[in-house]
């Protein structure tokens, strides 16, 4: 009798664990999905991972040095970074930007980072232009394009340009 009871308890516990495991959001590119990880080379050839930023609010920003609309949007992103990088959010501590460049030319990419004063440290590219692996993973068909993820890596918004970026960050403050 005691053995049957223990087996029954083990089955119930197993069912509970499995039901909680199912609460993890699926990986995808829609709001509510867990953002696909990005592991790519930095401007200096160092490997950077999006997953290393867990715990922070992160704007994944797809852009390129040759993209006029991207370059015009960069001052907005810089201002948001400077304003919110040390703030506390409902679902993350601090804010940063993880820039994914669709450039093919390293010198042009590096110059644009300097010219536009993109002071955050997370700049990556495979230098494959529109054939970029992560542009495909994220379904990017036009730039600028961005995805805002919370401290758990879940996409909370996308397509935040102009004042929409600042307004969204304000709503997410603690």
Image (cartoon, rainbow, N blue to C red):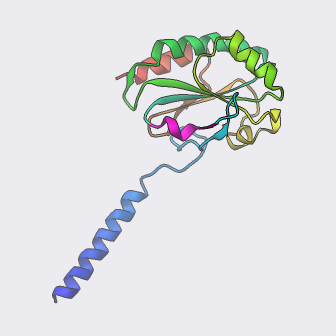
Total count of labels: 0
Looking at this view, is 157 or 129 the one in front?
129
Residue 158: in magenta span: no
Where's residue 34, x and y in %?
Answer: 53, 44
For residue 20, side relative to residue 164 (left or right): left
The quadrant holding residue 46 is: top right
Name the residue at the bottom extreme.
Answer: 1
Residue at (70%, 40%) from the top-left corner? Answer: 134
Residue at (51%, 12%) from the top-left corner? Answer: 82
The quadrant holding residue 125 is: top right
For residue 30, side relative to residue 86 (left or right): right
User: Taking 17 as reference, is 101 above or below it?
Assistant: above
For residue 6, side relative to residue 167 (left or right): left
Residue 48: in magenta span: yes
For residue 85, side relative to residue 113 (left or right): left
User: Taking 26 as reference, is 128 above or below it?
Assistant: above
Q: Which residues are magenta?
A: 47-54
Where's residue 37, x and y in %?
Answer: 59, 43
| Quadrant of the snapshot with the C terminus | top left
User: Taking 136 as reference, is 88 above or below it?
Assistant: above
Where's residue 75, x and y in %?
Answer: 63, 10
Residue at (60%, 12%) from the top-left corner? Answer: 76
Residue at (49%, 16%) from the top-left corner? Answer: 167
Name the residue at the left extreme.
Answer: 2
User: Taking 104 as reference, is 83 above or below it?
Assistant: above
Where's residue 112, x and y in %?
Answer: 74, 15
The quadrant holding residue 148 is: top right
């Amino acid at each position: 009798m005691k053995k049957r009871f223990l087996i029954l308890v083990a089955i119930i516990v197993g069912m509970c664990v499995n039901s909680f495991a199912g609460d993890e959001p699926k990986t995808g590119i829609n709001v509510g999905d867990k953002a696909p990880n990005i592991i790519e080379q930095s401007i200096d050839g160092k490997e950077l991972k999006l997953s290393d930023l867990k715990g922070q609010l992160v704007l994944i920003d797809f852009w390129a040095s040759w993209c006029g609309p991207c370059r015009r949007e960069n001052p907005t992103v810089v201002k948001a970074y400077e304003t919110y990088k040390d703030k506390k959010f409902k679902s993350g501590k601090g804010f940063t930007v993880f820039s994914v460049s669709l450039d093919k030319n390293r010198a042009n990419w590096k110059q644009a980072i300097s010219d536009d004063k993109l002071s955050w440290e997370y700049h990556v590219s495979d230098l494959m232009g529109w054939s970029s692996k992560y542009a495909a993973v994220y379904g990017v068909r036009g730039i600028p394009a961005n995805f805002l993820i919370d401290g758990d890596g879940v996409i909370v918004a996308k397509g935040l340009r102009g004042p929409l970026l600042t307004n969204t960050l304000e709503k997410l403050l603690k």
